[in-house]
Image (spheres, grey):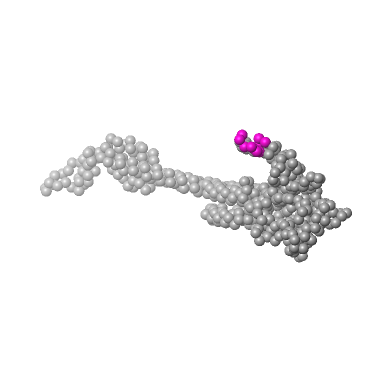
């Protein structure tokens, strides 16, 4: 029996690991008795003495009857469903001797499922498979049925020009007979659970799998014929321009926009981070849109790999922006930290000095030494108390009214405080003032040298930040473009879904 298959049209994509198509089958075989049988059945039907069970066509009613001739039986192994409102049509022809040939044509509109490998999406190409199982129901002395692939085509005679299928380009159709499968060995090898011992026709304990090649009804395994599997492969290639424009290009452009950050002021960290966060949100929105056009799979598609590479790029750009900001502002931040530490030390020393003001006199000298180490005559604090020798009292001449002179009162006030008390001097021309003046001159010189050093160091830090920024720009740009190119160059082309491992 010769089999020819022609693709009428493919109607659906492969997102759900299914495809919908209209196929036109052209089956031929030789049957010497077919012509006479059809003539007798047709005459009996037209005479009104016979009710035909199998018309030779469903296009026209009561035209001819094909009862009694041999008709091969076939079944679609990977059929998912057949639409209820599908267009159907079959015709059968019986040619007289010496050809004695029979022709059977049939339109089939259905949905088929199969495993798919989309690792090369959207630059992928593979074969769609329609599997037919032929059951030889011929009886002796019929020699039996042998299936021979005859012809095939990827387009039926339809008018018009343009793309035949949405999102796909059909590159050919082939028909081939698959090698016979040992059903008994298959079930015994791949059955995860063995048949029960009480099962009279267990698949893994008996040869009952041979019955699938026998005619239904009363039969034996010895009467089973060979089951022939025919594969119709439709080679398709995706329209990569459409997918590139709608899935690859938006992600690639968003990744390239992140490099605008390198042309912004490095000290404007808030502006840089704001741009990166905005690109993160835009990337998430684009991902939600493009995932509606991509099939779900157990592996990462090339377009998803590009999305991951873009996310990694945004994270690296953000980290680099923070790095160069800290490098450029290193001295200023260090100076601020030093000022905070000095302010803390001054506060702690002042608090200790305030507590020591009410301490006993014996602890005053030790407190003065400790505090002088931290605050040597600081401009904003009073000098620490120093013990002064008590002045000698002068004799006061007696007055008529019995009061001391003003000078005497001042002497008493100076000598008060338990005989030789402490004085708190807030200025004057004493020893502490001269020390403070010398210290201020030295501090001014040191501040001048330190400011010059800070200026030089700040310039060097700015140069380092600029250098890091330029190097990161070059490395990340080259790395991102290279990764994007390699993702799709290494994941493109035809994938053989049915090759033996």
Which residue is pictured at 36% across the width and 40% down the height? Answer: 371
Of all residues, the one furthest to the front in this rendering is 49
Question: In which quadrant will I find the C terminus?
Answer: top right
* Nearer-the-camera pick, 231 or 249: 231
Between 283 and 54, the residue placed more toward the observer is: 54
Q: Main secondary structure of the magenta part?
A: loop
Q: Position of residue 56 (x, y in %)?
A: 76, 59
Give whichever of 468, 227 is nearer the camera.
Answer: 227
Position of residue 88 measured from the top left corner of the image (x, y, whole percent): 71, 60
Q: Is residue 204 magenta?
A: yes
Tell me if residue 388 comes above or below residue 317 in the rendering: above
Q: Is residue 54 inside the magenta stretch?
A: no
Residue at (36% x, 42% y) in the render:
349
Tally the marks: 0
**Residue plotted at (73% across, 57% down):** 54
Q: Is residue 250 visible?
A: yes
Residue 276 shows up from this direction: no
Q: Position of residue 326 (x, y in %)?
A: 53, 48
**392 and 14: which is toward the camera:** 14
**Residue shown at 84%/52% (left/top)?**
32
Range drawn in magenta: 197-206
Residue 287 location in percent, x, y?
59, 54
């Amino acid at each position: 029996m010769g089999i020819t298959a022609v693709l009428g049209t493919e109607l659906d994509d492969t997102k759900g690991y299914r495809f919908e198509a209209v196929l036109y089958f052209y089956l031929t075989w030789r049957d010497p008795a077919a012509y006479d049988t059809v003539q007798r059945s047709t005459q009996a039907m037209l005479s009104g003495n016979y009710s035909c069970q199998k018309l030779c066509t469903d296009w026209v009613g009561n035209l001819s009857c094909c009862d009694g001739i041999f008709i091969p039986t076939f079944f679609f192994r990977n059929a998912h469903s057949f639409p209820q409102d599908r267009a159907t049509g079959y015709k059968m022809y019986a040619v007289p001797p010496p050809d004695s040939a029979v022709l059977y044509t049939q339109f089939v509109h259905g949905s088929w499922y199969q495993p798919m490998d989309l690792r090369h999406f959207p630059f992928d190409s593979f074969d769609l498979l329609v599997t037919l199982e032929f059951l030889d129901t011929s009886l002796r002395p019929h020699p039996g049925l042998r299936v021979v692939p005859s012809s095939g085509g990827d387009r039926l005679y339809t008018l018009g020009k343009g793309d035949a299928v949405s999102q796909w380009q059909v590159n050919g159709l082939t028909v081939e007979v698959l090698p016979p499968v040992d059903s008994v060995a298959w079930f015994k090898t791949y059955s995860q659970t063995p048949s029960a011992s009480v099962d009279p026709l267990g698949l893994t304990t008996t040869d009952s799998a041979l019955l699938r090649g026998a005619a239904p009804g009363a039969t034996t395994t010895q009467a089973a014929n060979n089951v022939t599997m025919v594969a119709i492969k439709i080679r398709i290639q995706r329209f990569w321009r459409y997918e590139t424009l709608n899935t690859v290009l938006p992600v690639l452009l968003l990744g390239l926009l992140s490099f605008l950050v390198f042309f912004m002021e490095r000290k404007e960290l808030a502006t840089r981070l704001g741009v990166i966060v905005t690109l993160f949100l835009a990337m998430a929105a684009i991902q939600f849109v493009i995932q509606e056009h991509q099939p779900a799979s157990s592996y990462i598609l090339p377009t998803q790999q590009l999305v991951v590479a873009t996310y990694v790029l945004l994270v690296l750009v953000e980290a680099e922006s923070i790095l160069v900001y800290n490098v450029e502002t290193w001295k200023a931040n260090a100076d601020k930290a030093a000022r905070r530490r000095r302010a803390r030390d001054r506060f702690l020393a002042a608090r200790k000095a305030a507590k020591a003001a009410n301490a006993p006199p014996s602890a005053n000298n030790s407190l003065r030494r400790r505090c002088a180490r931290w605050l040597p005559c600081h401009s904003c604090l009073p000098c620490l108390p120093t013990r002064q020798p008590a002045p000698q009292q002068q004799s006061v001449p007696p007055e008529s009214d019995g009061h001391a002179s003003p000078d005497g009162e001042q002497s008493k006030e100076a000598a008060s405080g338990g005989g030789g008390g402490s004085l708190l001097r807030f200025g004057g021309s004493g020893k502490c003032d001269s020390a403070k003046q010398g210290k201020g001159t030295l501090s001014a010189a040191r501040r001048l040298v330190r400011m010059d050093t800070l200026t030089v160091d700040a310039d060097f830090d700015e140069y380092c930040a600029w250098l890091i920024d330029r190097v990161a720009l070059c490395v990340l740009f080259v790395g991102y473009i290279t990764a994007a190119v390699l993702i799709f160059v290494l994941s493109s082309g035809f994938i053989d879904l049915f090759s033996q491992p």
